[in-house]
């Protein structure tokens, strides 16, 4: 849930990746250094012979970008009205200068920064 609202910190991403590694790779003394699956196979898609888990950072960006797709299409929803009212968006619903007005902890800061980067 957190990954769908906020841009994850690097240390959070590293911690999540460590949890995935620890789950997949036994760290007991008799198997130390032996892995059941290569790390690149964990991230690789199933169509390419991997496990299809994907990178945590990519998943975070995808979940945030979901809001970019939903925002202009759900103009009658409460969350749309709150965002539009709070950040005084332009009539076209996107304002690149808005990023500077958004507080550091706001989920909308991470979401709107992706808009600048990809659109």
Image (cartoon, rainbow, N blue to C red):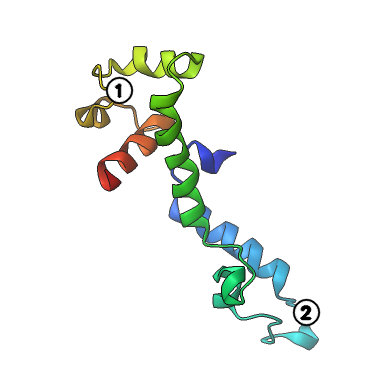
For the residues labelled 1 and 2, the Cα–Cα distance comes to 54 Å
In percent of width and height, residue 66 lies at 47, 39
- In terms of depth relative to the viewer, which is nearer, 15 or 48? 48
Q: Is residue 79 above or below residue 118?
A: above
**Front of the two marks 1 and 2:** 1
The picture places residue 72, in percent across and down from the top left corner, at 38, 26
Residue 100: x, y in percent? Answer: 23, 30
Quadrant of residue 85 within the rendered picture: top left
Quarter of the view holding residue 23: bottom right
Q: How many marks?
A: 2
Q: Which residue occupies the extreme left position in the image? A: 97
Q: Which residue is found at the position 34% from the left and 27% from the top? A: 103
| For residue 67, side relative to residue 25 (left or right) | left
Q: Position of residue 112 (x, y in %)?
A: 33, 35
Residue ID for mark 2: 28
Q: Secondary structure at mark 1?
A: loop
54, above or below 115, in the image: below
- Quadrant (top left/top right/bottom left/bottom right) for the N terminus: top right
> Of residues 47 and 28, which is closer to you in this image?
47
Indicate whether 4 appears above or below 33.
Answer: above
Asked whether residue 11 is in view, the answer is no
Q: Tell me which residue sits at (39%, 19%) in the image.
A: 83
Quarter of the image with the C terminus in it = top left
Please say whether residue 49 is visible from this viewpoint. yes
Determine crowd level at label 2: few under 14, some 14-19, many 20+ residues with C-alpha closer than 10 A: few
Q: Which mark is residue 93?
A: 1
Lower sequence index among marks 1 and 2: 2
Residue at (38% x, 38% y) in the render: 110
């Amino acid at each position: 849930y957190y990954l769908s609202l906020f841009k994850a910190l690097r240390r959070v991403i590293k911690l999540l990746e460590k949890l995935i590694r620890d789950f997949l790779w036994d760290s007991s003394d008799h198997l130390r250094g032996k892995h059941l699956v290569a790390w690149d196979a964990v991230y690789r898609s199933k169509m390419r012979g991997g496990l299809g888990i994907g990178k945590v950072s990519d998943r975070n960006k995808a979940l945030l970008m979901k809001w970019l797709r939903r925002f202009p299409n759900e103009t009658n929803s409460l969350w749309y009205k709150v965002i539009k009212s709070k950040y005084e968006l332009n009539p076209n619903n996107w304002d690149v200068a808005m990023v500077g007005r958004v507080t550091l902890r706001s989920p909308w800061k991470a979401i709107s920064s992706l808009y600048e980067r990809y659109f």
